[in-house]
Amino acid sequence: MLSKFLKDHLRLELHPKKISIRKIAQGVDFLGYVSLPHYRVLRTRTKRRMLKKVSKNNITSYLGMLTHCKGEKLKNTILATMKGDN
């Protein structure tokens, strides 16, 4: 049904090897975030990379990323780390 709708109305096709049906509670992994039904969290791999690479020069960029998800605890961790480096 979905394939027919996409093909007829939107002229799109699904890639046969890239389709996965998952439970909604698992969320959708997209662009470094996992989107869940009522909120978004940062992907674990992205968190680890962020903690390794954060510095005084790029902290505002990473804090900006955290405004798009539930990242209050990670924000506090980063700020505490930067405060301790001074």
Image (tube, rainbow, N blue to C red):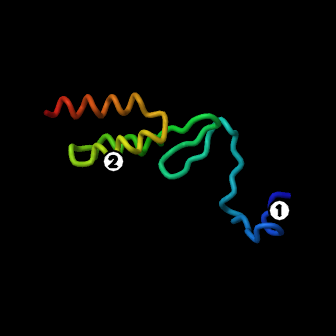
Q: Is residue 25 left or right of residue 9?
A: left
Q: How many marks?
A: 2
Residue 70: x and y in percent read: 48, 33
**Residue at the spot of label 1:** 5
Residue at the extreme left: 86
Q: Quadrant of the N terminus?
A: bottom right
Going from the N terminus, do you reach mark 1 or mark 2 first? Answer: 1
- Asked if residue 8 is positioned above or below residue 28 in the image, the reply reads below
**Depth check: 59 or 21 in front?**
59
- Residue visible at 74% across and 68% down in the picture: 13
Distance (Cα) linking label 1 and label 2: 40 Å
- Residue visible at 62% across and 34% down in the picture: 38
Q: Secondary structure at mark 1?
A: helix
Q: Quadrant of the C terminus?
A: top left
**Residue at the spot of label 2:** 61
Residue 53: x and y in percent read: 28, 46
- Residue visible at 68% across and 62% down in the picture: 17
Q: Of discs 1 and 2, which sits in the foreground?
A: 2
- Asked if residue 11 is positioned above or below residue 64 in the image, the reply reads below
- Asked if residue 39 is positioned above or below residue 32 in the image, the reply reads above
* Mark 2 residue type: Ser
Q: Secondary structure at mark 2?
A: helix
**Depth check: 38 or 27 in front?**
38
* Mark 1 residue type: Phe
